Amino acid sequence: MLTDIEIAQSVTPMPVEDIAAGLGLSRGELVMYGSDKAKVRLSALKDRQDRPDGKLVLVTAITPTPAGEGKTTTTVGLGDALHRLGKKTVLALREPSLGPVFGIKGGAAGGGYAQVIPMEDINLHFTGDMHAIGAANNLLAAMLDNHIHQGNALGIDTRRITWKRCVDMNDRQLRQITDGLGGRLNGVPREDGFDITVASEIMAILCLARDIPDLKEKLAAIVVGYTRDEQPVTAGQLKAQGAMAALLKDAIQPNLVQTLEGTPAFVHGGPFANIAHGCNSVTATRMALKLGDYVITEAGFGADLGAEKFLDIKCRKAGLRPDAVVIVATVRALKHHGGAEKGRLGEENLEALERGLPNLLKHIENITVKFGLPAVVAVNRFPTDTEAELALVRSKCAEAGANVALSEVWAKGGEGGLELAREVLRLTEEPNRFTMMYEDSLLLKEKIAAVVREIYNGDGVDFTPAASRELDKLEALGFGHLPVCMAKTQYSLSDNPALLGWPSGFRVTVRGVRLAAGAGFVVVLTGDIMTMPGLPKVPAAEAIDVDENGKISGLF
């Protein structure tokens, strides 16, 4: 059996100029990165702003498990299936982070015969967006520390600096550090730390900015810390926004690539959904909507994380309105939620499946009842799935008001997604009553409580004293109107990764809060979630290699 990277390397991509031409883009609207990838100038979006938008389809999933769900694979395969049906379809996906690529996952460009290519480039340096984001982030950190070293005219309290450095790697050693040591010439000693680049506010800003003027405005609004009298200090006060925007001027342009079957795909921006807002860029999504009749996008992890943030943050900020939602599930993963042993997930087990199905049913409820959107369940089929198991899934989903479509895109590409594509086409023609989970006017604590109660099924929220004070302070400073970005484990609807299925009777603990004033939301830290992951005992990096001809192997 061929590996993902072997399948990807067996296909010769079409020239990206041809992919662009199929969308009506001219050569002059592209910035070429070789023959198979290009950036699209923002002017292309501006010149088409009066065109009607295509249909927007969001792909999300059940709560992730070690068994895997295949959300990106399903997204790519669905796009290819719609393309096969003669629909002008464009994908809008996130860029992979080097952290998971070298850590657990080993690659994040889809799988099997449903991939975006060039797979190796996308998973590694791609067009340099991640590096530009890291450079802009760390430029601000350097300018902040230099300001303090040069006399601290703004009166910044070094104990109240909130801006961290970042690196696009899983590196637990950098979570908490002390820097500025070694004498007066080396700066002011203070506690510091690193986030992974995809958790940086710069990543969120890049993904939410409309254009370069909007980018600069958002960068200027970043709060880096507080003065001794508790007033916020911004990047604008440090005069950093212009230089940061200069580093990001190319990165803000969406990246155009293709699937194995030649479906156009914008791969741009990559915030994690467990510690950030988990969606690709607004510019990529908007450009796709102007160029295609159907746009398939995804949000990270389960619907309680990525989809909630897509709907409550991205749609709120960008004025988007989805037409349909796909919820990806596997029989194997549902049996895991039902308590089946990992080594026996391939065996028929209707009891475990029935115990695990409530997790899927809760996500259906969230999408269809809480947010008011039509949904289809895409069962990513495995050879070990039995007809009895599939029948049980269909029956329970039907009771919840959602149809099931089998997806075999991993093995068959677009052909394996035709059933799903036809159901998606039907759903996009249905009226919906899309509503967000909370109003801007609610207090921050009330917004957090609404997500915990309605989306997670929790009994309530417990705030540590420090988190409570910080939320009250943000309200007093005028930030109470912002949406909340929940940082929570992806492995449970609760903040406890051990609580599988559809748990109840739990409360969520908020232990910290971070203001992302530039991005326009408040990050809420729950449970033990960390903004800098670590590598596993056996990192995926150990299997990745390159030969004398530059051919890469080991990316799954």
Image (cartoon, rainbow, N blue to C red):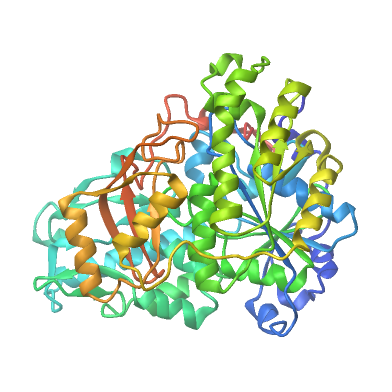
Q: How many marks?
A: 0
Question: x and y percent of residue 107 in the render?
Answer: 60, 39
Quarter of the figure with the C terminus: top right
Q: Residue furthest front?
A: 399
Front residue of 465/250: it is 465
From this view, report whether residue 470 is shown above or below residue 215: above
**Position of the N terminus by quadrant:** top right
x, y percent for residue 168 = 44, 49
Q: Is residue 124 visible?
A: no
Left or right: residue 510 versus residue 485 is left
Write the residue at 28% across / 61% down: 163
Choose top left, top right, bottom left or bottom right for residue 403.
Answer: top right
Q: In the picture shown, does residue 401 fall above or below 39?
A: above
Q: Nearer the viewer, residue 48 or 496?
A: 496
Q: Is residue 150 left or right of residue 353?
A: left
**Quadrant position of residue 161:** bottom left
Left or right placement of residue 155 versus residue 414 in this view: left
Is residue 340 visible to us here? yes
Q: Which residue is at a point 33% across and 71% down the rendered structure image?
A: 222
Can you give x and y, in whole percent of width and height, for residue 263 in the image? Answer: 80, 56
Residue 15 place in picture, x, y as percent? 82, 59
Quadrant of residue 149 within the rendered picture: bottom left
Q: Residue at x 53, y 38 (%)?
A: 63
Depth order, front residue of 329/370: 370
| Depth check, front residue: 112 or 249 | 112
